[in-house]
Amino acid sequence: AIVVPFSISSALGIAMGFIISFQLTQWCIFTKLHNDLQQECASFNRTGLKMDLENKLFGQHLASRIILKAVSEFMSNDNPKKPLVLSLHGPSGTGKNFVSQLIAENIYKEGMSSKFVHVFTSTLHFPNPRLLPLYKVKNSRGFMMTSCSSPNLNPLCSQYQLQQWIKDSVSNCERSMFIFDEMDKMHPGLIDSIQPYLEYYDKVVGVSYRKSIFIFLSNAGGESIVETALDFWREGRAREEIDLKDLETSVSLSVFNNEKSGFFHTSLIDKNLVDFFVPFLPLEYSHVVQCAMAEMKARASEGEGPPDLDVANQVAKDLIYFPKQERVFSVKGCKTIESKLDYYT
Ligand SMILES: Nc1ncnc2c1ncn2[C@@H]1O[C@H](COP(=O)(O)OP(=O)(O)OP(=O)(O)O)[C@@H](O)[C@H]1O
């Protein structure tokens, strides 16, 4: 047998010790940096979200309650079993995009401008998800949107690119957020392509998506929400009495069975990957006045004159309401308030 002199073996031992402790230190530094980075990418302000939902979102008691509970529980869970998947439904201009913005503002320092928040839009851009390139554009509110350009410009396409985008973001920030606007107009193939990220998997090709948030927005199911709200109004019952169970069945039926809902026959439904269906009610005259006042307040803080209730009423009166006879709900919710205010102020 080879006899190693004591001095050499102990020197080897010391060297090994050094190497191990050096690597341990490196690992600790790396882990700390990684944790700091994750902390920095997202830190949830529950009180902020609660206040924003109470003070800034009008006429949406159900959405407000569901969102606060869902987001708070998810963000306080350090080991969620799957990503949070919210599906927001309701008529146009009722606050679906707006609430996504409130969520983002209370998770990311830079809100919707954070590089970990991604808005994907669809409008007519996804006829064939395999062929279209994605590109980023700013929408009217200045948010970065991801969309597809004309089919022939780039042979590489959206399904792959979308997956890559999600992967890159989550690799840098586990708590990334992905918003899919106009889900009802999106190609079901595109939705299917993100399905692996929404599942209960520990990791998908080395990356864990379990801490990310996916929000789908659509008008699908809007008609049945409106019908229920109108029934309550006709029966003289308070809007706040509308309960989730009054809507859940009719909304889910119209979403699942509606070929145009974007959810039709997709694995999201078959596999129960959506955690919460969030209904948005149609807005009434009083909510439109509140929206106009809020917009005027925002403008006042930018140097314009103080909010004026007469102007808010004038703006609200100018909108179109339905049903024709009763004029209960605003056709476009609060959507056109900004441009109407430009006209009156
Ligand atoms: N419930 C609400 N409370 C406060 N403001 C609202 C509400 N609904 C809409 N608004 C205002 O109107 C603007 C347009 O609404 P938003 O884009 O959120 O509607 P949406 O439901 O996403 O509509 P669409 O289905 O057409 O995309 C918002 O930026 C916000 O200023």
Image (tube, grey):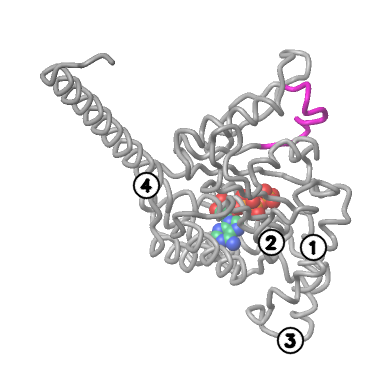
Q: Which mark is residue 236?
A: 3
Disc 4 is placed on an element classified as loop
Instruction: Choose the circle earlier in sequence order: 1 or 3.
Output: 3
Residue at x 68%, y 64% (from the top left corner) = 279
Q: What is the CA distance from the residue labelled 1 to the residue labelled 3?
A: 26 Å
Measured along the vertical axis of the image, is residue 19 above or below residue 50? above
Q: Which mark is residue 252?
A: 1
Contact, mark 2 vs mark 1 (Cβ under 8 Å): yes
Q: Amino acid at mark 2?
A: Phe
Q: Amino acid at mark 1?
A: Ser
Ligand 1 shown in quarter: bottom right
* Left or right for 59, reference 252: left
- Secondary structure character of the magenta stretch overall: loop
Q: What is the CA distance from the residue labelled 1 to the residue labelled 4?
A: 42 Å
Q: Which mark is residue 302?
A: 4
Q: Is residue 212 magenta?
A: no
Residue position marked by numbered label 2 in the rendering: 277
Measured along the vertical axis of the image, is residue 184 above or below residue 231? above
Residue 335 in view in this figure: no
**Disc 4 packing (10 Å; few <14; some 14–19; many ≥20):** few
Q: Which mark is residue 242?
A: none
